[in-house]
Image: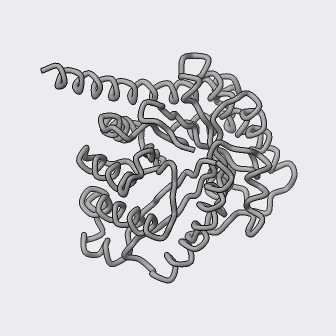
Amino acid sequence: MTSGDDQALYLLPFDHRHSYITGMFQFTPPLSAQQHAQVCESKQIIYEGFQLAVEAGVPREAAGILVDEAFGSAVLREAHRRGFITALSTESSGSEEFNFEYGDDFARHIDAFAPTFAKALVRYNPEGDHALNLRQTARLKLLSDFCRASGRGFMFELLVPATAQQLAALQGDRAAYDLTLRPKLMVDAIHALQDAGIAPDLWKIEGLAERADCVRMVEAVRRGGRTSVNCIVLGRGADVASVRSWLATAASVPGFIGFAVGRTSFWDAIAAYRAQRLTRVAAAKQIAGRLLEWVDVFERGRLARETSAGAAGAS
């Protein structure tokens, strides 16, 4: 599956599992049936917010959800039935190393939901643990080959956490790492994964402060004739101002077609609902408002880019 440069993708991801049940609910796995039902209910509320956002103007053909099988199977089936773009997480949650949530049975679980995309979240630092990277690459090749053979889109969420040595060289300054070192490491990681035969259709990219780095990211994912491959921006659970800035920067670059912003969209609303400070309807409306805000920021950035390109072409 491929996406043209003009086809936007505005994704609401709520496939969070380990961090969600421990951070939002303070539950300790394994969950009781009642606890499991509470988590599932919260994901239904997020989905209701998504639907409200579509009703309020998020383009239906660009709107999608990313959710997990464990707590979101009903949501996945309903969204698929209604013709929305769907993405299904495949990775085991809470693990530093990419492993399949359902082990060797991963393909059957993907096929059961027929998602638009199978998604893999991977922590991969090209200067990190070499043996770890090789193990992850071997599993990812299985997923990439399966997606190619089955006609499913392959969405790759790339996180490049700093090694201890990299942070030490920057006196522990994570902001400096994000600005000065992470962009190059991301390009190196993309090249290494491509060279290993891993072929995503779409890369979920951590937000970048500099437009030039966004340009380099598109060049990396499209190298070697991969002209139909695109990028979207992920939210990292960051504050609203940071997300807005990343979206505006990325939207100005052809090849960035949208975003996947999760926790910044839904966390406060679900927390308020659980504390009985918001009704279910009000929580869903708050989530919808956030999604509409991100779409507005991205669309404005894309329009400015296209206007500028048109003016340059006419001169």
Quarter of the figure that contains the N terminus:
top right
- Please state which of residues 178 and 311 is positioned toward the viewer in this rendering: 311
Q: Is residue 180 above or below residue 165?
A: above
Residue 51 quadrant: top right
Which residue is depicted at the point 82% across and 45% down?
A: 37
Could you tell me residue 202's position as x and y percent?
Answer: 49, 48
Q: Is residue 39 visible to us here?
A: no
Could you tell me residue 312's position as x and y percent?
Answer: 17, 25
Q: Is residue 274 visible to us here?
A: yes
Which residue is depicted at the point 29% across and 62% down?
A: 184
Question: For the view shown, which residue lies furthest in the right direction?
Answer: 33
Quarter of the figure that contains the C terminus:
top left
Residue 63 quadrant: top right
102 relative to 62 in the view: left or right:
right
Q: How many marks?
A: 0
12 relative to 215 in the view: left or right:
right
